[in-house]
Image (cartoon, grey):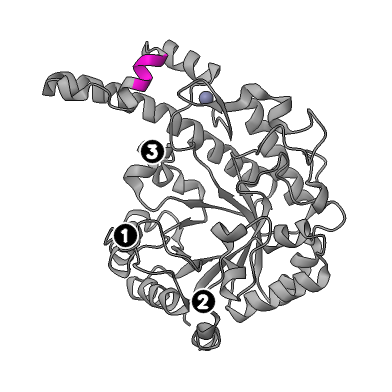
Amino acid sequence: MAVREERAVWVEQAQDLQLAGKFSREDVEKIVEECAQLGATKILWLLKARVADTASVLWYGSKVGDAHPAAESYDGLDDLVQLARARGIEVHAYFSVFPEGDPNAKDLAAGQAVLAQHPEWAVVDVNGKPTTFVCAGQPGYREYLLNLVNEVLDAHDLDGIHLDFIRYPRAACFCDRCLGQIKERFGLDRDDVVGLLERREFTSLSYDERAIALHQADSLIDYYCENVHQTVKSVRELIDERFASKKLSAAVFPNIRSSTSQVYCDWVGFSQYLDFVCPMVYWYSEEYFHRTVERLHRVVEGKTLLLPGISALGYPHGLAEKNENFHPTAPDHDYVRTLIEDTRAIGTGGFALFHHAPIFGHEPGHYTQTEWGAPLPQEGLSEFLEYLAR
Ligand SMILES: [Zn+2]
């Protein structure tokens, strides 16, 4: 018997509808119906927001953290589980792990946001300024995250947890904890860290001096990566201990080299804890998509299931027509279909689509906005759905 192709679909329309004040069971029915038309096997349902101009980032009822006020009257989660299950579709709680939003935003009372209560958890940038990201090395935040996971799996009949933004921002963290650890373990100060990671003055070093500096830089990269690694490991351990049948997965950067050195996400290293992984191979040209996915397929084979993330967003990448690795125009249904066929040729066993609403032409709302919600041109939709139904 043929193994069923896995089709994961990210869904973030609930936030748009919640913010518009008109989210109901009928909307959840429609979303599930549309995911079924895509032949979805897994819905990755956003519950902790990616990035928003809000302080609160939970979009469901929780006692562990504060939900966005717009999510309080109806979060749709139990209806979703019921409706998706009836169609044989899994539901995974999709958490943007480390972004926590603006601690001073007005949607919550002053001092209520996570980073208002714990400013010491924030990633501090190179200029000493706190950011809206949380540092992966903060034990208190890890405990908060585990409490969220525990609560959501306990209270809802979900199939698993999907981690996004399981990384640092595109720079190192200079919070007090990181600087203390780095001083103690590697004897390096703040300025050393900046010099080593930004490669300042490397041009004046001999090859031997460079070797020493690169070892030091590696220690730093490894330190930050380990903070992320331990976070994923702790979620896996919680799931194994309390929710043995549930799955853990993550969305990650598609380039292994830059993922570790730029955002400190060594996901090949933590893929052992994942049931499936979705590298976000977004806006790549067909040729570069093929090359990337083929390599990743070999790297993770036997460790976890690879579901390459395909961008179904109706606008071109900033490097379109400037860099041959990127698709020269905005994605359309044909582009998505071509890449799906490529995953079949490579033999990944499935793919993931980012994301549901643009495929069906739903206009972006206040959460997704044009940047993350531009619809695909709709003339290709019916043919695309026919193709997926074959
Ligand atoms: Zn830090």
Which residue type carries mark 2? Answer: Arg
In terms of secondary structure, where does tag 3 sit? helix
Q: Is residue 280 above or below residue 203?
A: below
Q: Residue visible at 46% across and 70% down? A: 350
Picture disc at residue 203: none
**Of the residues tagged 2 and 3, which is closer to the observer?**
3
- Considering the whole magenta stretch, tell me its main secondary structure: helix
Image marks 2 and 3: residues in contact by CB distance under 8 Å: no
Which residue bears the numbered disc 2?
Answer: 4
In terms of secondary structure, where does tag 2 sit? loop
Q: Earlier in the sequence, mark 2 or mark 3?
A: 2
Q: Is residue 273 above or below residue 381?
A: above
- The image quadrant that residue 151 belongs to is top right
Measured in 3D between alpha carbons, the distance from the residue under mark 1 to the one under mark 2, in whole angstroms, is 23 Å
Front-most of residues 282 and 321? 321
Q: Residues within 10 Å of mark 2 (few under 14, many from 20)?
A: few
Residue 82 can be seen, yes or no: yes
Task: Specify whether 366 is left or right of 333.
Answer: right
Residue 246 can be seen, yes or no: no
Image marks 3 and 1: residues in contact by CB distance under 8 Å: no
Picture disc at residue 292: 1
Which residue bears the numbered disc 3?
Answer: 262
Measured in 3D between alpha carbons, the distance from the residue under mark 2 to the one under mark 3, in whole angstroms, is 35 Å
**Of the residues tagged 1 and 2, which is closer to the observer?**
1
* Span highlighted in magenta in the image: 190-194
**Of the residues tagged 3 and 1, which is closer to the observer?**
3
Q: Residue visible at 80% across and 30% down? A: 110
Task: Specify whether 60 is left or right of 306.
Answer: right
Picture coordinates of residue 307, whole percent (x, y): 46, 63
Task: Specify whether 76 is left or right of 4.
Answer: right
Taking the magenta stretch, the answer to whether it contains residue 214 is no
